[in-house]
Amino acid sequence: MENPLFKSGFIAVCGKPNVGKSSIINAIIGQKIVITSDKPQTTRNKINCIYTQPHCQMVFVDTPGIHKPLHKFGEYLVKIAVNAVKGTDAILFVVDAYEGIRASDEIVADIVRRSGVKAVLAINKMDIAKTENVAQEMENKIRSICPNITDTVNVSAKSGKNISTLVQKLENMMPQGPMYYPQDEVTDKPSRFIVSELIREKILYLTQQEVPHSSAVVVEDFEQRENGTLYIRANIYLERDSQKGIVIGKDGAMIKQIGQLARKDIERMFEEKVFLDLFVKVKDKWRESDFLIMNTMGFKDEFKKGEK
């Protein structure tokens, strides 16, 4: 028999690039579901991350950072983020205590305001804030733009400070409702997607600034072999031949390191031995191609929803 007092809902996680949205979600869920990096545009797709307790299920919709797009690919990322806000039960609006409020935060605040959805402001990175009173100043500024902020919590995703308080604030905003996902699921994305993201995270971590925005990962094979090993073959797509040389590295050293780090995370997630086979390919100007973005790079379903 279902619990009539069970609460559930969807929470859009919004903020400019690199404020720590993914880190906060991972801290709430208790494991790495969405990849993190100190580079903007790390999150490219809408990912549902599921937090389930006996009395409540909250589905966090992790979105690409909202920013002024510089090319067609950037426009798609912003569309995903804006569409994710619509129809949710609450918004988690994340800002960066170290940087303070910038024009890009005000753009996000205006989108949150126009949605009309009640929101909690999470002031992240309080462990490295420059001054003690910065949080109050930031809260005042955001509230002046966005009156639908109902609560503010100062947090640190890195240390875990006040994450439980943030969870409680969000739980209080959830309506009574069903359990949308089985209690053991933590994301709605297929295994291939999670694997491609873990590989891309290692590229972001290990390569120079010119490579990350130009890289995409597509898992071509994902199969359990008779010897008990999970075999994964993935293509890393880049825009230029010069980037291919960087990702492969001298005598293949870089691609080997990317594979080793990614394999460890994949084995930890699936709890089995993994054979990871990586290939590097060049597709010129893929970020400007509607066809490649929506079909080859896995964004097709998202933009079908966004075109409605």
Image (tube, rainbow, N blue to C red):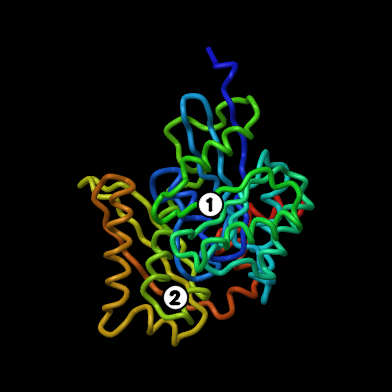
Is 35 located above or below residue 243 in the figure?
A: above
* SS for dot 1: strand
Residue drawn at 54 percent across, 63 percent down: 97
Residue 291 coordinates in the image, percent (x, y): 64, 67
> Mark number for residue 154?
1
Residue drawn at 34 percent across, 79 percent down: 248
Which quarter of the figure has residue 275? bottom left
Which quarter of the figure has residue 36? bottom left
Residue drawn at 49 percent across, 64 percent down: 129
Residue 31 coordinates in the image, percent (x, y): 38, 47
Which quarter of the figure has residue 4? top right
Q: Of the two numbered discs 1 and 2 on the same chain, state the one appearing first in sequence.
A: 1
Question: Disc 2 marks which residue?
Answer: 281
Residue 12 seen: no
- Classify residue 127 as left or right of residue 61: left
Residue drawn at 39 percent across, 44 percent down: 30
Residue 24 coordinates in the image, percent (x, y): 48, 52
Amino acid bearing label 1: Asn
Amino acid bearing label 2: Lys
> Mark number for residue 82?
none
- Classify residue 216 as left or right of residue 232: right
